Amino acid sequence: MGLKELKDEYEKLSKKYSLPKFEQLDEEFEIRAIELDKSGILIKAILRGITNKLNIFMSYLEPIITAPPQNIHSLIEVRNLSDADRSRVFEFYKEISVLLHENLAVELKSEREIAQQIKKVWKLWPKIKGEEINLLDKTTLAWKKKEESPIVKAEYSG
Protein backbone atom coordinates (compact mmCIF):
# COMPACT_ATOMS: atom_id res chain seq x y z
CA MET A 1 0.00 0.00 0.00
CA GLY A 2 1.17 3.47 -0.80
CA LEU A 3 0.88 7.00 0.48
CA LYS A 4 -2.55 7.54 -1.10
CA GLU A 5 -4.01 4.54 0.72
CA LEU A 6 -2.44 5.68 3.98
CA LYS A 7 -3.90 9.15 3.57
CA ASP A 8 -7.31 7.69 2.73
CA GLU A 9 -7.30 5.48 5.83
CA TYR A 10 -6.09 8.38 7.98
CA GLU A 11 -8.81 10.63 6.57
CA LYS A 12 -11.45 8.18 7.85
CA LEU A 13 -9.93 8.31 11.35
CA SER A 14 -9.54 12.07 11.17
CA LYS A 15 -13.20 12.59 10.35
CA LYS A 16 -14.34 10.12 12.99
CA TYR A 17 -12.25 11.61 15.83
CA SER A 18 -11.40 15.17 14.68
CA LEU A 19 -7.69 14.41 14.43
CA PRO A 20 -5.15 16.90 13.02
CA LYS A 21 -4.60 17.01 9.27
CA PHE A 22 -2.43 14.24 7.84
CA GLU A 23 0.18 16.72 6.62
CA GLN A 24 0.53 18.27 10.08
CA LEU A 25 1.10 14.95 11.85
CA ASP A 26 3.35 13.78 9.06
CA GLU A 27 5.53 16.88 9.30
CA GLU A 28 6.15 16.28 13.00
CA PHE A 29 6.01 12.48 13.32
CA GLU A 30 6.69 11.20 9.78
CA ILE A 31 3.57 9.06 9.70
CA ARG A 32 4.01 8.58 5.96
CA ALA A 33 6.58 5.93 6.93
CA ILE A 34 3.78 3.74 8.29
CA GLU A 35 3.21 0.72 6.10
CA LEU A 36 -0.42 -0.22 6.54
CA ASP A 37 0.10 -3.85 5.63
CA LYS A 38 2.97 -4.22 8.13
CA SER A 39 2.08 -1.85 10.98
CA GLY A 40 -1.12 -3.36 12.29
CA ILE A 41 -3.87 -0.98 13.30
CA LEU A 42 -3.25 2.49 11.85
CA ILE A 43 -4.24 4.56 14.87
CA LYS A 44 -1.96 2.45 17.09
CA ALA A 45 0.89 2.83 14.59
CA ILE A 46 0.44 6.62 14.69
CA LEU A 47 0.56 6.60 18.48
CA ARG A 48 3.72 4.44 18.34
CA GLY A 49 5.29 7.00 15.98
CA ILE A 50 4.51 9.78 18.44
CA THR A 51 5.83 7.67 21.31
CA ASN A 52 9.02 7.02 19.37
CA LYS A 53 9.60 10.76 18.88
CA LEU A 54 9.10 11.35 22.62
CA ASN A 55 11.57 8.54 23.36
CA ILE A 56 14.14 10.22 21.14
CA PHE A 57 13.66 13.47 23.07
CA MET A 58 14.15 11.62 26.35
CA SER A 59 17.34 10.02 25.08
CA TYR A 60 18.81 13.50 24.59
CA LEU A 61 17.87 14.53 28.12
CA GLU A 62 18.68 11.43 30.14
CA PRO A 63 22.50 11.77 30.10
CA ILE A 64 22.15 15.27 31.53
CA ILE A 65 19.96 14.00 34.36
CA THR A 66 21.87 10.83 35.20
CA ALA A 67 25.35 12.07 34.14
CA PRO A 68 27.62 9.18 35.09
CA PRO A 69 30.96 10.64 36.19
CA GLN A 70 32.93 8.55 33.70
CA ASN A 71 30.88 9.87 30.76
CA ILE A 72 32.78 12.83 29.28
CA HIS A 73 29.90 13.76 26.99
CA SER A 74 27.45 14.15 29.88
CA LEU A 75 30.08 15.83 32.05
CA ILE A 76 30.64 18.62 29.53
CA GLU A 77 26.93 19.25 29.13
CA VAL A 78 26.17 19.20 32.86
CA ARG A 79 29.11 21.44 33.76
CA ASN A 80 28.01 24.06 31.26
CA LEU A 81 24.34 24.22 32.23
CA SER A 82 23.09 26.36 35.09
CA ASP A 83 21.32 24.83 38.06
CA ALA A 84 18.10 26.36 36.74
CA ASP A 85 18.65 24.75 33.33
CA ARG A 86 19.38 21.34 34.89
CA SER A 87 16.26 21.67 37.00
CA ARG A 88 14.23 22.52 33.88
CA VAL A 89 15.69 19.50 32.07
CA PHE A 90 14.53 17.27 34.92
CA GLU A 91 11.02 18.76 34.98
CA PHE A 92 10.74 18.46 31.20
CA TYR A 93 11.97 14.86 31.38
CA LYS A 94 9.19 14.11 33.86
CA GLU A 95 6.58 15.74 31.60
CA ILE A 96 7.66 13.61 28.66
CA SER A 97 7.75 10.51 30.87
CA VAL A 98 4.13 11.04 31.87
CA LEU A 99 3.09 11.26 28.21
CA LEU A 100 5.12 8.17 27.33
CA HIS A 101 3.50 6.12 30.06
CA GLU A 102 0.06 7.40 29.08
CA ASN A 103 0.76 6.48 25.45
CA LEU A 104 1.83 2.97 26.39
CA ALA A 105 -1.23 2.42 28.55
CA VAL A 106 -3.72 3.91 26.12
CA GLU A 107 -2.41 1.79 23.24
CA LEU A 108 -4.02 -1.13 25.08
CA LYS A 109 -7.39 0.62 25.15
CA SER A 110 -10.06 1.54 22.62
CA GLU A 111 -9.61 3.33 19.32
CA ARG A 112 -11.47 6.33 20.75
CA GLU A 113 -9.10 6.58 23.73
CA ILE A 114 -6.08 6.32 21.44
CA ALA A 115 -7.49 9.13 19.30
CA GLN A 116 -8.01 11.26 22.43
CA GLN A 117 -4.38 10.68 23.45
CA ILE A 118 -3.12 11.64 19.99
CA LYS A 119 -5.14 14.86 20.23
CA LYS A 120 -3.80 15.51 23.73
CA VAL A 121 -0.17 15.13 22.65
CA TRP A 122 -0.85 17.18 19.52
CA LYS A 123 -2.20 20.04 21.62
CA LEU A 124 0.92 19.93 23.83
CA TRP A 125 3.31 19.40 20.92
CA PRO A 126 4.24 23.05 20.18
CA LYS A 127 5.33 23.51 23.83
CA ILE A 128 7.18 20.18 23.92
CA LYS A 129 8.96 20.83 20.63
CA GLY A 130 9.87 24.38 21.65
CA GLU A 131 11.27 23.21 25.00
CA GLU A 132 13.29 20.46 23.31
CA ILE A 133 14.74 22.94 20.82
CA ASN A 134 15.60 25.33 23.66
CA LEU A 135 17.36 22.63 25.69
CA LEU A 136 19.21 21.26 22.68
CA ASP A 137 20.38 24.78 21.81
CA LYS A 138 21.72 25.17 25.35
CA THR A 139 23.58 21.87 25.25
CA THR A 140 24.99 22.74 21.83
CA LEU A 141 26.34 25.97 23.33
CA ALA A 142 27.98 23.90 26.07
CA TRP A 143 30.02 22.19 23.37
CA LYS A 144 31.05 25.50 21.84
CA LYS A 145 32.47 26.91 25.09
CA LYS A 146 36.24 27.06 25.38
CA GLU A 147 37.43 25.12 28.37
CA GLU A 148 40.26 22.97 29.51
CA SER A 149 39.92 19.43 28.27
CA PRO A 150 38.18 17.20 30.83
CA ILE A 151 40.50 14.42 29.71
CA VAL A 152 43.45 16.35 31.14
CA LYS A 153 41.64 16.77 34.47
CA ALA A 154 40.49 13.17 34.65
CA GLU A 155 43.84 11.64 35.53
CA TYR A 156 44.20 8.15 36.88
CA SER A 157 43.44 8.09 40.58
CA GLY A 158 43.79 4.36 41.27
Image (tube, grey):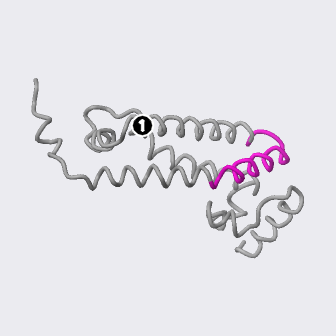
151 relative to 18 in the view: left or right: left
Give the residue type at disc 1: Arg
Q: Secondary structure at mark 1?
A: helix
146 relative to 42 in the view: left or right: left
Query: Where is residue 34 shown, x and y percent of the image?
Result: 66, 63
Residue at 86% x, 64% y: name it: 12
Specify the quadrant that holds the C terminus. Answer: top left
Residue at 10% x, 30% y: name it: 156
Query: Where is residue 35 shown, x and y percent of the image?
Result: 67, 64
Extreme-top residue of the structure: 158
Query: Where is residue 88 shown, x and y percent of the image?
Result: 49, 38
Front position in the image: 1 or 124: 124
Query: How many numbered discs?
Result: 1
35 relative to 68 in the view: left or right: right
Magenta-colored stretch includes residue 144:
no
Query: Where is residue 132 shown, x and y percent of the image?
Result: 51, 51
* Residue 19: quadrant of the picture: bottom right
- The residue wearing badge 1 is 86
Prevailing secondary structure of the magenta residues: helix
17 relative to 51 in the view: left or right: right
Magenta-colored stretch includes residue 113:
yes
* Stretch of the chain drawn in magenta: 107-126
Residue at 75% x, 57% y: name it: 42
* Residue 76: quadrant of the picture: top left
Specify the quadrant that holds the N terminus. Answer: bottom right
Extreme-right residue of the structure: 16
Residue at 77% x, 72% y: name it: 5
Q: Residues within 10 Å of mark 1 (few under 14, many from 20)?
A: some
Where 154 falls versus 5 (above or below)? Answer: above
Front position in the image: 60 or 6: 60
